[in-house]
Amino acid sequence: MKKFLYIFICFFVLTSMSTSESGIINKIKVSYAKNQIKKEFKFAWDNYKQYAWGHDELLPLTKTYKDWYGEPLAITIIDSLDSLYLMGFNDEFESAVNWVIKNVDFDKNIKVQAFEITIRLLGGLISAYQISGNEKLLLMAEDLAERMLPIFDSPTGMPYRYVNLRTGEVEDYINNPAEIGTLTLEFGMISKLTGNKIYYDKVKNAVVNLYNKRSKIDLVGTHINIITGEWTNKESHIDGAIDSYYEYLYKSWLLFGDKDFFNMFKTSFNAVEKYLSDPYHGMLWYKHVNADTGEPISRHIGALCWFYPGLLAFAGNIQKAEELAKSGYWMWNNWGIEPEQIDYSTKEVLNPAYILRPELIESTYYFWKLTGDNIYRDKAYNMFNDLKVFAKCDNGYTRVKNILTGEKDNLMDSFFLAETLKYLYLTFDDSKLDFDNIIFNTEAHPFMDIQ
Ligand code: DMJ
């Protein structure tokens, strides 16, 4: 009975949040929310353990698993290591680390997507190494980075998209700014941690050469041929395929203190702000334009864009970031959860999926950290509850195929544990992190500044 009374009080407290509440009530709310998030993480993790352990991702509806490349790389485990630690599952963290060291071997005859393997596996191993101090994790990370080095052997120094982990054979020379530019933190950290400069030099060279291909108005397109250096698609935006290119220019400056990254960020950021930022019918959005002319192409915005308010705030423009985030919250609440893509000029859903993405939640964490305003905890908690309504199933959390009908898909992406639930949790308790001295990679793996 007592338990029900407690739940009732907590529910009442949480649904009547206001910034004027007393410190004690806030503490109860915060600890209730954090425990709820932790509980859902454990539920998702336990289901992964039961039905997919050692494999890449859980298929919760069919209680089985998916391996991206036929042979498993334990993507969910490596991607989840630091979440386990940050949420206080210390024994689980230790045993998962030991399992990874004993069972994961990258000497596999498979062709992998360098970007995804870098942000999830290299990123996960680096942060787990920094947390645990276990040198074996660093050796694994270095081995993986070395196996991927052949991607940079192109005439422009920009990477191929795929590489065979055993033979070094590369494939796919049409790449994009996100996949070219979102390797710097991870490869740069390997250089820092091992003292071998090759990784940093290769990624920096790739990014500088990409940056030098920007248009006269300082914008980049969506696809580039890394053999010839010619753009094959000149649509410019902050959506998927470009998004984290901007994030890593800024974060690489912060993590490595390399002024070149700051200069590249500043120029690019000014162009984004000038040509893409789109106040439209009383709300702020970011449009798609032609990279050469700045002429509008569409008023489409995708779920991946919502990392940008957080970056904008982190880079110092909190006011504008909050204005942009308002559009994101409007969108989320209008449909009860976030659609994968909408046309903001017609308010039409173009892609009705929600694939457990973290970006708006990630931005909310940054707002909470930078403003200390409880309203962001409120927003995070509401989004968490919406996730439960739309994406929870009997054996984990799953992608939603159609948010308009509620139809579920069958995949729990590793970033759900690595990012979505982590950023939610950190919004209520990030006491195990030194926020001022870490930089999150784009998969939410915290890298410690060791300068
Ligand atoms: C994650 O793997 C990363 O956040 C990446 O930058 C973009 N896509 C997914 C999540 O949406």
Image (spheres, helix red, strand yellow):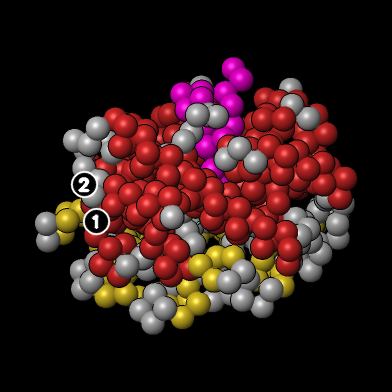
User: Could you say which is closer to the camera, residue 12 or residue 209?
Assistant: 12
**What's the residue at 43%, 29% (across, down)?**
262
User: Could you say which is closer to the camera, residue 107 or residue 231?
Assistant: 107
**As drawn, is 259 to the left or to the right of 152?**
left
Q: Which mark is residue 327?
A: 1
Is disc 2 surrounded by few (<14), some (14 to 19) or many (20+) residues within 10 Å?
Answer: some
Which quadrant of the figure contains the C terminus?
A: top right
- Tell me if the residue at label 1 has its CB under 8 Å from ligand 1: no
Q: Residue furthest top?
A: 451
Q: Which residue is mark 2?
A: 323
In the rendered structure, does residue 269 fall within the stretch colored magenta? no
User: Could you say which is closer to the camera, residue 61 or residue 55?
Assistant: 61
- Disc 2 on helix, strand or loop? helix
Q: Magenta residues? A: 434-451
**What's the residue at 29%, 56% (across, down)?**
328
> What's under tag 1, amino acid-wise?
Ser
Across and down, in percent, residue 444 comes to 54, 43
Q: Which mark is residue 100?
A: none
In the rendered structure, does residue 441 fall within the stretch colored magenta? yes
- Disc 1 on helix, strand or loop? helix
Q: Is residue 156 visible?
A: no
**What's the residue at 35%, 54% (across, down)?**
8
Which quadrant of the figure contains the N terminus?
A: bottom left
Q: Where 47 falls versus 420 (above or below)?
A: below
Across and down, in percent, residue 62 comes to 66, 78
> Which of the 4 quarters of the picture holds residue 348?
bottom left
Q: Where 256 falls versus 171 (above or below)?
A: above
